[in-house]
Image: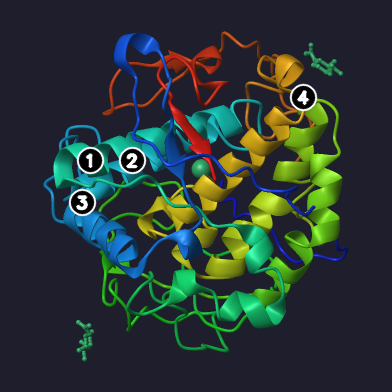
């Protein structure tokens, strides 16, 4: 079954409460103690030099040979290995309980890989959605800068109905799409993505497309939406507000809006499985991890252990296609990262400042 994030949005919806100013400090995880957490920053808080260091580290990872081609035969680079992993087990960590925890560790693995394989000295930057949640600001986002960013939209292609040119795309019509073409400017111009779109590890090289839908950002990432998300009092409800209430027009919330505002109908970033083929993926999930962390820290004593939801994709309460058998997860649910080391449990990633994690969001 091919599943894309969703169709359109009908209704609008926190502003992330005041940002904590954490002091800049290097990670210090010696003896499991996180006394000086690394600070992850919003893209616009980075100097141009720091932005270029990140862009170049990602490009370096794209030219670092795959280490997991036994698992992901189409992967040429270590960057592609991440995409392969996300496709292969994509049905185990979307529209379910492990979703946020699984992606939190994926972000850490990616940051670690940039450091160990490419000498990156910074921290994973994130997308502060509150800066780009209008139609006007979205398209001008510094994240899409051609020099100090990741490049912008593809050229507008009005008709994307051809099943030959566009075999896999977001279901339904997305009014307000503005792109669809291959990326031709910026540091990732002419990037060839080896796998996808969709749930397949087959070698299917294709250009990196983007298909901005700014209206989705203006609704799904609005102050109203974010305050509703942040006012949820338990993980069950919070997770539903992050992942959405359906793939129907009215059901899309934050996660869907982040992916679809960039990926639209035919772009890589919109695909549930192959979206890590677009390096923007790491801004999306860094941004989402920051929202989860922010929500946790509003009542940390309770929320550092609050996790729930089904173990199965599209099971209740994400049963958008009917009921499927499932069990509810516990905090000891395993989370797997084939090709990237040992599996963990959700408990291992509940606190960004303990155990294997040692970072805070500025
Ligand atoms: C991208 O490909 C096009 C067409 O092959 C070419 O004209 C253009 O110079 C390339 N751009 C970059 C940045 O490599
Ligand atoms: C899972 O948890 C939800 C919320 O507490 C509950 O409504 C549902 O019945 C549980 N499902 C199973 C299979 O235990
Ligand atoms: Cu994902």
The local secondary structure at tag 4 comes to loop
Which residue is at the front of the view, 52 or 27? Answer: 27
Residue sitting at the far left = 65
Task: State the residue position of label 2.
Answer: 111
Task: Answer left or right for 140 relative to 71.
Answer: right
Residue 157 rendering spot, x and y as whole percentages: 51, 88
Residue density around tag 3, few if under 14, some if 14–19, many if 20 or more, within 10 Å: many
Sequence-first disc among 3 and 1: 3
Tell me the mark number nearer the camera, choosing from 4 and 2. 4
Q: CA distance from mark 1 to mark 2?
A: 6 Å
Determine whether the beta carbon of the residue marked 1 sits less than 8 angstroms from the nearest atom of ligand 3. no
Q: Is residue 143 above or below residue 14?
A: below
Residue density around tag 4, few if under 14, some if 14–19, many if 20 or more, within 10 Å: few
Residue 104 rendering spot, x and y as whole percentages: 50, 33
Sequence-first disc among 3 and 4: 3
Which residue is at the front of the view, 75 or 276? Answer: 276
Q: CA distance from mark 3 to mark 1?
A: 10 Å
**Dot label at residue 299:** 4
Residue 207 rendering spot, x and y as whole percentages: 32, 72
Residue density around tag 1, few if under 14, some if 14–19, many if 20 or more, within 10 Å: some
């Amino acid at each position: 079954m091919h599943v894309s994030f969703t169709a359109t949005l009908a209704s609008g919806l926190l502003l992330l409460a005041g940002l904590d100013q954490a002091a800049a400090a290097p990670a210090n995880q010696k003896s499991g103690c996180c006394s000086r957490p690394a600070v992850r920053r919003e893209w616009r808080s980075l100097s141009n030099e720091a932005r270029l260091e990140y862009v170049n580290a990602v490009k370096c990872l794209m030219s670092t040979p795959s280490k997991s081609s036994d698992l992901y035969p189409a992967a040429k680079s270590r960057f592609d290995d991440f995409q392969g992993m996300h496709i292969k087990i994509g049905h185990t960590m979307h529209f379910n309980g492990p979703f946020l925890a699984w992606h939190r560790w994926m972000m850490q693995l990616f940051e670690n890989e940039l450091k160990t394989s490419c000498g990156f000295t910074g921290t994973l930057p994130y997308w502060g959605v509150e800066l780009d949640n209008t139609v006007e600001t979205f398209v001008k986002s510094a994240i899409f800068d051609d020099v100090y960013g990741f490049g912008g939209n593809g050229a507008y292609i009005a008709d994307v109905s051809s099943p030959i040119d566009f075999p896999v795309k977001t279901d339904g019509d997305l009014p307000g799409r503005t792109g669809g073409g291959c990326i031709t400017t910026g540091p990732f111009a002419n990037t060839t993505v080896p796998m996808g779109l969709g749930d397949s590890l087959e070698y299917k090289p294709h250009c990196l497309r983007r298909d901005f839908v700014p209206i989705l950002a203006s609704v799904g990432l609005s102050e109203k939406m974010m305050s509703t998300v942040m006012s949820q009092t338990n993980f069950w409800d919070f997770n539903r507000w992050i992942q959405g209430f359906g793939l129907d027009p009215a059901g899309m919330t934050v996660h869907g809006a982040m992916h679809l505002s960039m990926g639209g109908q035919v772009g890589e970033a919109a695909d549930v499985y192959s979206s890590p083929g677009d390096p923007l993926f790491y801004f999306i999930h860094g941004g989402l991890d920051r929202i989860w962390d922010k929500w946790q820290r509003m009542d940390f004593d309770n929320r550092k252990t609050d996790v729930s939801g089904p173990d199965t994709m599209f099971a209740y309460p994400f049963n958008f296609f009917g009921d499927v058998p499932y069990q509810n997860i516990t905090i000891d649910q395993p989370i797997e990262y084939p090709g990237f080391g040992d599996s963990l449990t959700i408990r291992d990633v509940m606190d960004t400042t303990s155990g294997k994690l040692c970072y805070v969001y500025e």
